[in-house]
Image: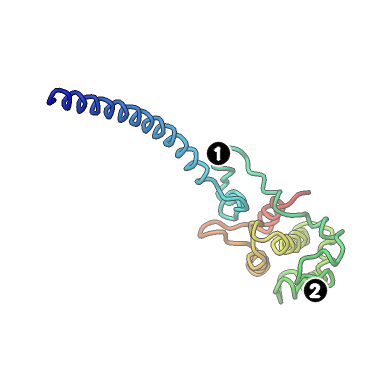
Amino acid sequence: MDNKIHDESQATATESIAKDSVANDARRRFTRTGLGAGAVIATLASQPVLGAVPYACTISGHASGNVSSHGQPTNCAIFGKSHGYWKKTEKHAWPSPFDPEQLFKDAGGVSGSLLDVQGITTAKTLLEVLGLDGGDMSALAREVVGAMLNAQAFAPDFPLSVAQVKSIWNEVVTYNQYTVKPGVAWTSEDVKNYLESLHDN
């Protein structure tokens, strides 16, 4: 009888070891597969979330010349519309609180500036600024109006807020440059080029 119990006990132990071996193999396969999937999930999780602005499209990223974290150029032009688009867009399609007949000085929050001579900051409407000819400050003013409209219409995806656009404009017209960070200043042309990079043509 003791032999029978011993044999049954040994058979049960053998079955248990076999089941454990199968279970262990399954666990190992799952762990290997799970680790591979975890790496994929971790990689996906480290990418910018949908709607997040790529670093290269921010002021800091643009100033540092950071094209992309993966060596591919980043297309920042997908974030907004050109000043020409806004110039042709019907009044009702402009993002509130902006209005084509609103004075630039009221929308931009500027008073006295380098542009008073040209009458841009004191007498022109947003629509008139969008239609200005010429380069330098007129070109920058067109881009600033377009950037304010883009920031309002396409927030939070547009790389700048309306307040940032106004701040950039005010700094350029006050100091004839925009300080990106200590030791790095943009001319009005640099600012214009950056704003142009944020919209389609």
| Numbered label attached to residue 48 | none
**Residue 22, image x and y in percent?**
35, 27
Estimate how packed mark 1 is, as few (under 14), some (14 to 19) or many (20 or more) residues with alpha carbons within 10 Å: few
Residue type pointed to by label 1? His
- The answer to whether residue 74 is left or right of residue 82 is left
The answer to whether 64 appears left or right of 170 in the picture is left
- State the CA–CA distance, disc 2 to disc 1: 43 Å
Q: Splitting the image into 4 quarters, where does residue 139 fall?
A: bottom right
Give the answer, above or below, for where 24 lies relative to 132.
above
Element at label 1: loop
Give the percent coordinates (x, y) of residue 86.
81, 59
The quadrant where residue 187 appears: bottom right
Q: Tag 2, which secondary structure? A: loop
Residue 128 visible from this viewpoint: no
Identity of the residue drawn at 32% across and 29% down: 19
The residue that label 1 is drawn on is 70
Name the residue: 21% across, 26% down.
8
To which residue does mark 2 refer?
103
Quarter in which the N terminus is drawn = top left
Q: Earlier in the sequence, mark 2 or mark 1?
A: 1
Residue at horizontal 57%, vertical 61%?
A: 179
119 in relation to 93, above or below: below
> Is residue 122 or residue 106 the one in the foreground?
106
Task: Judge depth for marks 2 and 1 and give the one in front.
Answer: 1
Please state which of residues 41 and 1 is positioned toward the viewer in this rendering: 1
The structure's colour scheme is rainbow
> On screen, 88 above or below 197?
below
Residue type at mark 2 is Leu
